[in-house]
């Protein structure tokens, strides 16, 4: 199982071994919901680049 990082509103970063479909956990410090930090920067860049690329080329 992979380790995921979760970030809470209180600034706490929690590393947890969780299932892939776990989107949030409870912060151990403040008991609020900590959200999974998505390490999908490359995926987002790829999608955005593809979109703007196709858009601009079809415009010209
Ligand atoms: Zn917290």
Image (cartoon, helix red, strand yellow):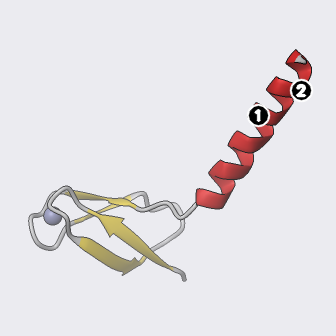
Q: As drawn, which residue projects farthest toward the left? A: 30
Where residue 57 sits in the image (x, y, percent)? 89, 26
Q: Quadrant of ligand 1?
A: bottom left
Which quadrant of the figure contains the N terminus?
bottom right
Q: Quadrant of residue 49?
A: top right
Q: As drawn, which residue projects farthest toward the top? A: 59
Question: Is 46 placed above or below 48 here?
Answer: below
SS type, badge 2: helix
**Side of 4 where 30 appears, left or right:** left
Residue visible at 23% across and 61% down in the picture: 8
Where residue 48 sits in the image (x, y, percent)? 69, 41
**Side of 11 where 56 appears, left or right:** right
Where residue 3 sits in the image (x, y, percent)? 47, 81
Which quadrant of the figure contains the C terminus?
top right
Question: Is 38 placed above or below 51 here?
Answer: below
- Mark 1 lies on residue: 51
Q: Which of 39/19 is in front?
A: 39
Tell me which numbered mark, 2 or 1, is placed earlier along the sequence. 1
**Side of 52 where 9 appears, left or right:** left
SS type, badge 1: helix
**Is the residue marked by circle 2 packed among few (<14), some (14-19), or many (20+) residues within 10 Å?**
few
Q: Quadrant of residue 12?
A: bottom left
Where residue 55 sits in the image (x, y, percent)? 81, 25
Residue visible at 75% across and 32% down in the picture: 52
- Mark 2 lies on residue: 57
Residue visible at 27% across and 72% down in the picture: 13
């Amino acid at each position: 199982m992979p380790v995921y990082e979760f970030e809470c509103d209180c600034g706490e970063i929690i590393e947890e071994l969780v299932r892939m479909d776990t989107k949030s956990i409870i912060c151990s410090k403040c008991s609020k919901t900590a959200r999974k930090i998505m390490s999908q920067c490359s995926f987002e860049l790829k999608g955005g680049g593809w979109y703007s690329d196709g858009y601009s080329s079809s415009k010209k």
